[in-house]
Image (tube, rainbow, N blue to C red):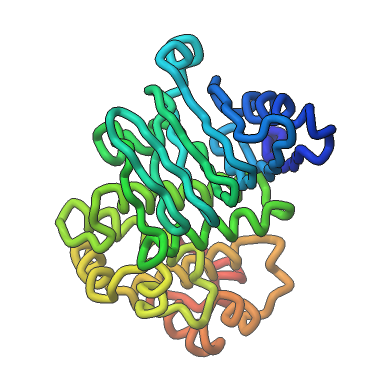
Amino acid sequence: MPAESYLVESQSTHEVTPRERADFWSEHIGSYQSRMGFAYARPDDFGGETVRQRTEKYQLVRFRSDEIEYSRTARQVREDPDGDYRLLLPLTGGIVLRQDGQEARLTPGTGTLVSFDSPFDCLQDATTQAYILTIPAREVDGPLNRKSPLATGLDLTRGLGRVVGSMLNDLHAERDVLTDAQFDAVSDRIVELLCMLATGDDRPDATGQLSDVETMVRRYVRDHAADPALTGTSMARALGWSLRQIQLALQRAGTTPRDLIREERLRLVRERLRCGDCEHLTITDLAYASGFSSASALSTAFRQRYGLSPREMRNGGRRS
C-alpha cells in the first residue's frame, strides 16, 4: 500500500519575536507557494497565521494576516514557473488583485481563479481571512478547453457557488480526520463545480453542459445512496440546480432521479452481499443501511433487477 501524503500543519507569527515576524512570514509562505515579493505595512510587528492541508495533488490554506502586498514579477515567473491556479476566497476583509491589465476586488463570498503563470499584484487589508486552494492547471484548462482568465468573478453566496463555499468550509473543519484519498476526492468535486461556475452559468441548460450535470448527479447519488432521505428534490437543493435540470440531464441518459437512486442502492446491496466483511448483516440490516425503507422493499426491487432475492445471492446464486 502506498504511504499517505496528506499533511495538516499550522503556523503563526506569534512563535517568533515581533521584529522577526516579517522575515518569518516571507520564508513560511515562500516555502509552499511560488516565488513572490512581500511588502509589509508594519514590518516591525506583522501578525499572521495559517492552517495548511495538502496532498501531492491539492493544497488548501486558510490564513489570516495583517495588511500586506504580494507581487510576482515577470522575472520570478521565468525563474520559478508555476502553471497551477489558486482559488482565492476572502472570508473577512478585502483583497485587490491585479493581473494582465485587469483588476478584481474581492470581498467575502466572491472568489477568483488566479494564475501564477503571469505577473500579478495582490493587496490585502488588515482584517482579511481567506482560503487559497492550489489547483493543478490540467484540472481547469482541460474541462474549460482554454486557459482560465483572471477575475473570473465567482459568486459563492448562492446556488452552486454556495455549495462550493460550504465544501471548502467542511474540508477545513474536518481536516484532522480526512485521509489523502478523501481530501483529493472532495477537492476534485470542488474543482468540477468551479469549472461550471467559470463558464458564466451556474444553471447550465446547453446540451454539452447537461452532460456535466449528469456526471455530477451520478457522483452525488453514488456518494449518498445510503441516505433514506435522498430524492431528486433533495439532490437538486444540495447541488444548487433545479429539479427540472436534473431531470433533463438524466432523461438524455435514459433514466430518472428515482430510477438512478434505486439502481445505486441495489448496486450497494449487491456489493455488500459479495463482501465477506458484511456477512454478519441481516437482509433487514442491509436494507436500512442501503437506503431502503424495509427488507421487503429491497427484496422486491432486487429480484426485479437481478432475477433472484438478496438471500439467494448471498447463498451462492451470484449473477453478474
Left/right of residue 96 with respect to residue 313 in the rendered view: left
Left/right of residue 28 with respect to residue 123 in the rendered view: right
* Percent x, y of residue 46: 70, 37
Above or below residue 91? Residue 157 is below
* Percent x, y of residue 252: 19, 63
Who is closer to the viewer here, 283 or 242? 242
Who is closer to the viewer here, 103 or 315? 103
Above or below residue 261? Residue 216 is above
Work out which residue is located at the far left of the displayed protein and give it.
Answer: 207
Who is closer to the viewer here, 66 or 228? 66
| Quadrant of image for the C terminus | bottom left
* Percent x, y of residue 98: 37, 34
Let me know if residue 109 appears in the view: yes
Who is closer to the viewer here, 39 or 264? 39
Let me know if residue 142 appears in the view: no
Left/right of residue 245 with respect to residue 20 in the rendered view: left
| Quadrant of image for the N terminus | top right
Above or below residue 225? Residue 140 is above
Residue ID at (43%, 34%): 85
Q: How many marks?
A: 0
Left/right of residue 151 with respect to residue 3 in the rendered view: left
* Percent x, y of residue 43: 68, 30
Residue ID at (35%, 43%): 104
Residue ID at (72%, 55%): 177
Residue ID at (44%, 58%): 109
